[in-house]
Image: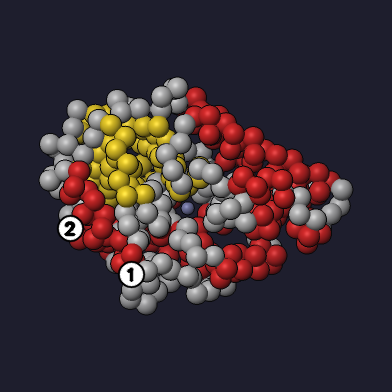
Amino acid sequence: MGSRVKRLAGKLVTGLAVGCGCLLSVTAAGRPSEKMDLPDWSRTPVEDRDLGQGVHMLESFGGNIGVLAGEEGVLLVDAEWSQLHGKVLAAVARISPQPVRYLVNTHWHWDHVGGDGLFGKAGVVIFSSEETRQYIVQAQTKKSPPGTPYTPDPAAIPVVTVTNGVKFHLNGQTVEIIHAPPAHTNGDLIVRFVEADVIQTGDTFFHGFYPDIDQPHGGTIDGMIALYDTLYNMCGPNTKIIPGHGPVARREDVREYQAMLREVRNRVVKAIASGMTEEALVASHPLDDLDVKWGGNLIKQPYLLGIVYEELKDRQSAAR
Ligand SMILES: [Zn+2]
């Protein structure tokens, strides 16, 4: 990863009042550590979207949480920031009086796993991919001070790792956990609530704004673009999609997103072929038309251009 991306990443962390764990991964990967602009947690709600058949989406500051609730207990997919743990538990308690038994991490970013330690201490069994577990263990070895992300905590480390896939049979529902090929990271898990017809994508898909791609942890733009074919084909006309961030989506949203990301990639490829530097590309504002729809949230044009340019350029150099 080149210096331009490091600089842009630092700027991204400083400049945005957001909680995408991808931004925190920037710090965890050893790049510039900047002060994040966090919300007033006491005023940050956790909102419940009922998707039917005991499946809910909890939406708040960090990554969306998937919930499967019923008589046999509760399964959660992702755990939010630890500061929101009390509100997450309260939201789950409004859905079901049964305890949380299982927690699946879609990937290692803090806004998806921040609550792991608190769930682990309460006896919840945490599942993740092997890669995600490894990244959490690695991040904990950096010995972050107490109260900061990835503070050493054995209870926050996933107990069961998923290599190819696993199925839960709970509350009369089937939940398929699928290990995606490298996309947002190389350890992404996709979750399918079969009977409820809901798919949870983790951060492989953001609904309504540009993606982030954690290339230092195996993410890749071509993997993202290819995965949208898989996701689309997993969906029927009524499937509800829980994205990593953003509101509930439908399969058409995935197709539209894929077309946007392909377009971004094509423009960057052309710039590289014409010998344009990354700085010149960013300065030329090549995504201004796409910004209207996609640039209004976490990820801004210069950052996206930077990570796509450097990945494609690095690959070109490696192929020589
Ligand atoms: Zn992420």
Place residue 279 in its image quadrant. bottom right
Residue drawn at 18 percent across, 47 percent down: 94
What is the x, y in percent for residue 202?
43, 45
What is the x, y in percent for residue 143?
39, 74
Left or right, residue 54 beside residue 207: left
Amino acid of disc 2:
Ala
Residue drawn at 33 percent across, 76 percent down: 146
What is the x, y in percent for residue 21?
46, 59
Residue topped by disc 2: 122
* Comes first in the chain, label 1 or label 2: 2
Amino acid of disc 1:
Pro
Left or right, residue 241 beside residue 182: left
Residue topped by disc 1: 152
What is the x, y in percent for residue 42?
30, 67
Mark 2 Cα-neighbour bin, 10 Å: few <14, some 14–19, many ≥20: few
Q: Nearer the viewer, residue 46 or 118?
A: 46
**In the rendered image, is residue 76 in sight?**
yes
Q: Secondary structure at mark 2?
A: loop
Q: Nearer the viewer, residue 295 or 279?
A: 295
Place residue 147 in its image quadrant. bottom left
Q: Secondary structure at mark 1?
A: loop
Q: Relative to 259, does residue 159 appear above or below in the rendering?
A: below
How far apart, in angstroms, are the residues tagged by discs 1 and 2?
17 Å
Residue drawn at 12 percent across, 36 percent down: 71
Count of numbered circles in the view: 2
Q: Nearer the viewer, residue 1 or 243?
A: 243
